[in-house]
Image (cartoon, helix red, strand yellow):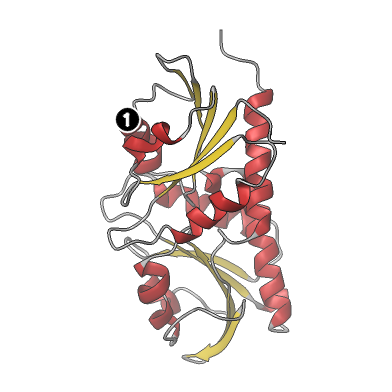
Amino acid sequence: MKKEGIGLLLIGHGASLGGGGAVRRLAERLGQDEAFDQVAACFWKETPYVGEGLKLITSPIVLAIPVFATEGRIARDLIPAEMGLQGPLTLLSDGRSVHYLRPIGVHPGLARLVEERAELAAMAASFDFKATALLLVAHGNRQGGGAKASAEGLAAQLLKAGRWAEVRVCFLEEEPRAADWQCSIKTRQIVVLPMLLAEGQHAARDLPPLFGLKELGGADPVLTEFGGYRLAITQGLVDDQALETLIRRMVQETLSRPSPR
């Protein structure tokens, strides 16, 4: 029997042409968890929109988690404003309490998940870690807003661990551009990890041609050669079961904190 009283709201970016399928699947899987009596998903760019999100959960305690890889203006400012939230904890007029968490991508646990997936890709390609670069491809924002700093911080953390010959980050919508990735990497064998926690045109259409591919579907990772480089390209993170574990951890951490007086 499911535990009553706790609802989970996953907030995805989505896309005008659809693209929230991975977040919806994540919500469906977590909906089987007895820790939550309700689980739903809403989106910034597709229905149900974030402004309708709190109507999807009637539980007295709601945990709203942005399924974003980085923390930029959308997750930090625009989504809570659209939802009428006043900070990390908001008490609604109907008696519900809403905990608004920071995006999944800035939780320390995501760095380990990223590294584990990258290590598996390197091993699948028989790459020597010390002779391999790790390339993180993030979305970025052409208007700025701070998302870039989150991805760069993760890259710096992974480089400091000393596992890889190089760790670089590039962006689909700001500098340094993903289209120019060959300009920044000296190592000839590379693990490519898209920091895209959603589907949509970026993952399906924009990303594959940068590495000489038509699509990234199929086996994980995709092993290929392009421009004189040997590449092992991982798939998105949302369908990884470890992400479900990380979300449960975030929920436990939030609910275990003392309530602000």
The quadrant in which the N terminus is found is top right
One can see residue 130 in this view: no
Q: Residue furthest front?
A: 1
Residue at 64% x, 76% y: name it. 132
Quarter of the image for residue 247 reads top right
Q: What residue type is labelled 1?
A: Ala
Quarter of the image for residue 236 reads bottom right
Residues 18 and 131: in front is: 18
> Residue 93 at what x, y percent from top left?
40, 13
**Left or right placement of residue 131 versus residue 228 in this view:** right
Residue at 54% x, 27% y: name it. 59
Residue 205 position (above or below residue 229) = above
Q: Residue furthest top?
A: 261
> Residue 125 at what x, y percent from top left?
68, 83
Callout 1: helix, strand or loop?
helix
**Left or right placement of residue 115 versus residue 93 in this view:** right
Residues 232 and 87: in front is: 87
One can see residue 20 in this view: yes
The quadrant in which the C terminus is found is top right
> Residue 61 at what x, y percent from top left?
55, 24
Quickly name the residue at label 1: 81
Residue at 65% x, 68% y: name it. 118
Residues 174 and 95: in front is: 95
**Left or right placement of residue 82 versus residue 228 in this view:** left
> Residue 124 at what x, y percent from top left?
71, 80
How crowded pointer 1 is (Cα within 10 Å; few <14, some 14-19, many 20+) is rated as: some
